[in-house]
Image (cartoon, coloured by chain):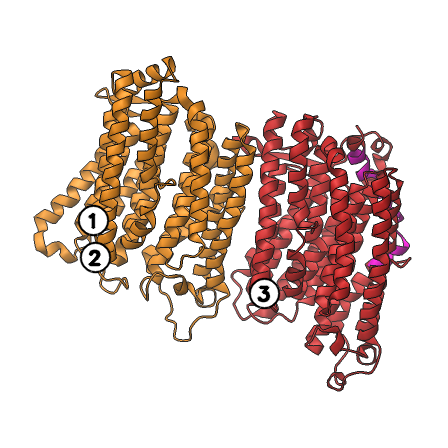
Chain colours: A red, B orange
Amino acid sequence: MNGPLLLTLIWVIPFVVALASLPVRHDDHQRIKMLSLAGTLVNLVLVIVLTLQFIDVAAISKVATEASLSQFHFVHKVAWFKIMNIEYNIGVDAISVLMMLLTAIVIFCGVLASWNVKEQAKEFFILLNVLVAGVYGVFISIDLFTFFLFYEIAVLPMYLLIGLWGTGKKEYAAMKLTLMLVAGSAFILAGILALYFESGLNTFDLQLLSQVRFSDSFQYWVFPIIFLGFGVLGAIFPFHTWSPDGHASAPTAVSMLHAGVLMKLGGYGCLRVAMYLLPEGAHMWMTFFLVLVTINVLYGAFGAIRQTDLKYITAYSSVSHCGLVLFGFTAMTFTGLKGGVLQMISHGLMTALFFCLIGMIYGRTHTRTVSEMGGLMKVMPFLSVAFVVVGFAGLGLPSLSGFVAEANVFVGSFANPATINRVCTILAVLSIVVTAVYVLRTVNSLVNGPIPFCFKELTDASLLEKVPVTILLFCLFGMGILPGWIIDLVNGAVHPIYNNLMR
Amino acid sequence: MILLLLPDLLILLLAAFILAFDLYKGKDASGSTVTFHASWVGLMVIFFILLNLPYDEQALYLGSYQVTGTSLLFKQVFVLSALFTVLLSGPYFTPGGNYRGVLRYRSEFLFIILLCTFGMFTVVSSTDLLTLFIGMELATIPLYILSGYQKEDRLSVEASTKYIIMGSLSTGLLLFGYSFLYGCAGSLTFEAIGAACAANPDEPLLKLGVLFVLAAIGFKLTLFPFHMWAPDVYDGAPSPVTAFISVSSKAVAIAFLLILVYGPLAAMHSYLQPILLVLAAATMTVGNLGALKQKRLRRFMAYSSIAQAGYIIMAMAGDAKSAYSSIIFYLFVYAAANYAIFFILSIIGRNGEERLSGLRGMGKGNPVLAAVLMLTLFSLGGIPPLAGFMGKFLLFAAAAEQGYYAMVVFAALNSTISLYYYLLLVKEAYIAQPASNRQTLTLDPIQKTSLALLTFAMVFVGILPVFSSSILAIVQ
């Protein structure tokens, strides 16, 4: 199929599904769920087709990648708003294709995992689809305006998704999350406008802007603005506080999507906008952000040790692992950038599975407190084994996806000869040990030991629930055992960004 | 060419017809809805005529009444605003239509609205300070009457009194400022004042005069520190009047300022820029912080519109083209969102006071209405893909073009604060648990159609580029 058309279809389909759900009767939950499932399935197929096409195209243009400054394929431009020469300008590189693949997998599993939503299911799935449409939109945009527009669309439905269907202190968490992310995008907006006017090109086109060499004094203040703006969504310290509350209160599918994909938008934006367009600014500020991100990695890990609620543990581990994404970027080496991208994918799969499993376990035990559980291996072996595996992925066991990504991140970071990089790398590596502590402790008290009386009658996962878990497990192993094709793709996409950084 | 003057003449005719009809019918007409239907049909006709006028031509009448493309755009805003006010006022004049009690003398109400709109037409057509002044007074004095229209209600009377006192003060300041301008230029025409400004932009008396004019218009535009009257007046006045004040009166004040700043005072723009930016920053902050704790929705809307005025003024730091295009575009967007909110207020106002708690349970009981409310609030908050986002983006861009990036950050953060209180309304509608004995909300056909139209506008103006580019084309 024609590439640009495919890209447009991918974000339009969720919107269409959302619109098609509108006339469905309010209590006809089955139909709404089937509609969403069908939509996400079609999307998954389309994204796989896109990936295959992309691999073909990338293989042809591989020779050129080392020196090239632009890596986008399937580019298509349509004038949109004449008023500031805003264009609907789409195209993908390997990073966005992989992120779209991740999104498609996670949302497909997410819809399956939220099959048990009973209250106001119609609104739930409509909002979920709008959110996903926004996420796809971000990944295909090359025009900064459209990029920002989709970014906001992806952030806002979260408020109601958490506020209405969440648990615990959901209203507080929803408000906190929304406001912090929107405040982040306030900085992004200013940054984008500054880039637009300072370049003098009268365009929001990323590719054209990346060729401009902005003055150093301009980069000096605009880089941190954009980096922090996106960093908020990437849970950069000290703006990570929305993440534990938000993820802990969100319903299962939303946690999966948010921690799995949406947080990656932050890292993606940092790389794609801040570092790609403002390389000199990146050099000026990297040490500062390196320190912040190291705090992220350690603080998240130590925070997870202190928690007793399963979702909070995972949320804090997300802060730590998302920190590793940015940690890879701040290394400013080729391997580091690559590692960051890999970590985005790996963490997306891993954390989605984590939240998915927690949702299923919570649906049975009705508690998320680790100390109240035990011996689950006896009553729900499937879920327990999956939990153990994903725990191992989290602590970076080889043959699982986490290892590939983390190895690249740490190698890349240590490859930067600056002392501060070396020191921070050593500190950050320590987080693996801490991660091992909380993961093993949690897994141990969850699946082993005597089983509380009240849990004796619990059942294992139903067939419907096994599907998403199996898919995600398969992906985790797939990426861990056969990472070659992903790394090849990522290499091609990181080259132009790296070349720009080193110009 | 009389064609360009047609809307102005028609609106006067319509006003005259309504007053005459009322006088002719006498007491029999008290329950009649003829004038109501005549006004909204008439306003619609005028709007369609406005749409079909040639926007690339301009004409000067009697040496002091000028019609240009931009003034026609402003007239569109005013006519639309009057139209929706008329439609909005329906239930307030029918017994049982509103919790606060029935309003009487419908024809006079409509007449005053139309007359007021004509005053606004005059403001945007003026070429000298005198016409500008007369237009502004004609646009303001009727509002004093309207805000006291709920005669038995103490709050309404208080609102009217407060508005008169504040309004008179502002008129006084305006005339005082004019006297300095006149003193410097020796004439009241924009041309002469423009020449005087260009010849000597650092003249202290000129600056003083401009400051007084700014202060005077600050009252009308609810700029900090002249915004204090707004919450009381908005709260006390009947809801349709509040809606009219919040849109039309604000729009005319902005038009007034635009005409002066980019017309006769263009040479002083670099002197005005910092003043306008400081005013904008203070105004949006005050509005946003004030709105946080409001439970009465009309008061809430007062603060929200104060904040919106701040964003709008910010764009006046930009050059003429981007300021005009972004501000006019935003006025349409803002008007649509504000009227949508006031229609929802009129719907919940049937069963009880127009308070935050009236929204409770809307998400379950009236999902469509709740969705409209949410879209409207998101549009006000500037969330894509709604029109409000594009509007704010253009306003911010106008300031950013001149290099005021810090101001853009500040305004965007402010708009995050505003999102907080807009979300509070969403939360009340969707998440808060309603009381069990809650009455269901009913909509009459006019409310349904209007809300549908407004929602349609909010969604499509943000997505389709045709609106913004046609405004840009006209402004150029």
Which residues lie in the magenta part?
A476-498
Residue A146 at x, y percent in the picture: 61, 40
Q: Residue at x 47, y 54 (%)?
A: B422
Q: Amino acid at mark 1?
A: Phe
Q: Of the residues under marks 2 and 1, which one precedes in the sequence? A: 2
The residue singled out by tag 2 in the image is: B103
Q: Are marks 3 and 1 on the same chain?
A: no
Residue B166 at x, y percent in the picture: 26, 42
> On what subunit does the disc labeled 1 rest?
B
The residue singled out by tag 1 in the image is: B109
Q: Secondary structure at mark 1?
A: helix
Q: What label does residue A79 carry, if any?
A: none
Q: Residue at x 68, y 31 (%)?
A: A219
Q: What label does residue A170 carry, if any?
A: 3
- Please tell me whether residue B464 belongs to the stretch shown in magenta: no
Q: Amino acid at mark 3?
A: Lys
Of tags 3 and 1, which is closer to the observer? 3
Q: How many marks?
A: 3
- Please tell me whether residue A485 belongs to the stretch shown in magenta: yes
Q: Secondary structure at mark 3?
A: helix
Residue B3 at x, y percent in the picture: 27, 27
Residue B6 at x, y percent in the picture: 25, 31
> On what subunit does the disc labeled 2 rest?
B
Q: Secondary structure at mark 2?
A: loop
